[in-house]
Structures are given as structure tokens and as C-alpha cells.
Image (tube, helix red, strand yellow):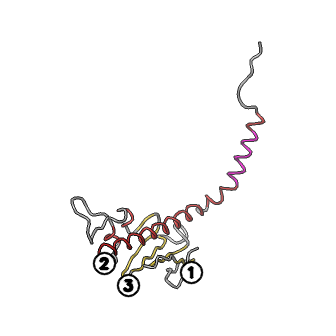
């Protein structure tokens, strides 16, 4: 009676190793210079800004005005109820002025509010700045100068 051996042949292992090597060779430069990390942080910044736009809309519906700061949109501290100073519309970590390598600043304007997102360290944390206001349209600036309502719209 003959037993059949189980396992992989040397040729199969070499082929798989070659395929893995090619994939790593393609992906390594992008990972090495941080391009993937920077893109991820920029995407996160835009998503967080869109969350603030939704929260501002809800805040205005409840209190008849826009929140003056990210803290006003955040959850209340322990033992406190929600209200205009802590509406509980965004997570506490988003109320922090820094998240995932981006700094956020919000100001009230004559027509509503403006939110600016800038990389903490340009080129290391991000290569673009972002701007959004009560219209909900995100604008971007490619470079280290701040985005504004006049900057190109993010596509």
C-alpha cells in the first residue's frame, strides 16, 4: 500500500514566495514614504469635518443657532445633561482640536460658521488643508496655505 505525501512541493513554495515578493516590491515605496498614511489622515479629516456639518445642522435645529465651538457639539461631562454647552452630537474625541494628525478650528461667521482642518505637520501628517462652512461643501488647498471658501471644491 502506498501513502500519498501531503504538503507543498518546493516549486509551489518558490512560486508563492515570488508572488509575495513582487507584491511587497510594489507596495513598499508607498508605505515607506508615508503616502498611504497621509492619504488616510486626509480622508479621516474630511469625514470628521462632514460629521461636524451634520452635527451643526442638528444643533441649529435644536437651539436655533450654530454651535460656537466643537466643545458645544461634544457630549456633556459626567452628571450633566445635554444642552447648548454640550449637545452630545459628536464623539468626545472629535471635540479635541487635534485628531489623526489634523488640527481643527471652528469660528462663527456672519452667515453661520467655518471649520478649517490643517495638518499638524505639513507633509508628514497631510498635504492638504480643508475648509467647510454651513453649506456643507468641502474645499481643499493643495499646499500649506489654509483652504477657504474660494479654494477648489474637494472632488
Looking at the image, tell me whether mark 3 or mark 2 is earlier in sequence order.
2
Q: Is residue 19 magenta?
A: yes
Looking at the image, tell me whether mark 2 or mark 1 is earlier in sequence order.
2
Crowding at mark 1 (Cα within 10 Å: few <14, some 14-19, many 20+) = some
Q: Which residue does the numbered mark 3 point to in the structure image?
A: 109
Crowding at mark 3 (Cα within 10 Å: few <14, some 14-19, many 20+) = few
Q: Which residue does the numbered mark 2 point to in the structure image?
A: 64
Tell me the quarter of the image containing the C terminus: bottom right
* Disc 3 secondary structure class: loop
Looking at the image, tell me whether mark 3 or mark 1 is earlier in sequence order.
3
Question: Looking at the picture, how far across and down is residue 67, in whole percent?
Answer: 33, 75
Q: CA distance from mark 3 to mark 2?
A: 15 Å
Question: Looking at the picture, how far across and down is residue 115, in whole percent?
Answer: 42, 76
4 vs 40, left or right, is right
Q: Nearer the viewer, residue 101 or 107?
A: 107
Q: Residue at x 37, y 62 (%)?
A: 91
Amino acid at each position: 500500500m502506498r501513502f500519498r505525501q501531503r504538503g507543498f512541493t518546493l516549486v509551489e513554495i518558490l512560486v508563492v514566495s515570488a508572488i509575495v515578493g513582487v507584491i511587497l516590491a510594489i507596495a513598499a515605496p508607498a508605505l515607506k514614504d508615508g503616502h498611504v498614511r497621509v492619504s488616510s489622515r486626509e480622508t479621516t479629516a474630511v469625514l470628521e469635518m462632514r460629521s461636524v456639518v451634520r452635527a451643526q445642522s442638528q444643533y441649529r435645529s435644536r437651539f436655533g443657532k450654530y454651535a460656537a465651538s466643537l466643545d458645544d457639539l461634544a457630549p456633556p461631562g459626567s452628571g450633566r445633561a445635554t444642552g447648548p454647552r454640550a449637545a452630545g452630537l459628536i464623539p468626545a474625541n472629535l471635540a479635541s482640536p487635534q485628531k489623526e494628525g489634523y488640527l481643527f478650528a471652528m469660528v462663527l461667521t456672519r452667515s453661520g460658521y467655518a471649520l478649517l482642518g490643517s495638518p499638524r505637520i505639513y507633509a508628514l501628517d497631510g498635504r492638504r488643508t480643508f475648509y467647510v462652512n454651513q453649506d456643507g461643501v468641502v474645499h481643499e488647498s493643495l499646499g500649506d496655505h489654509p483652504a477657504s471658501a474660494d479654494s477648489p471644491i474637494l472632488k
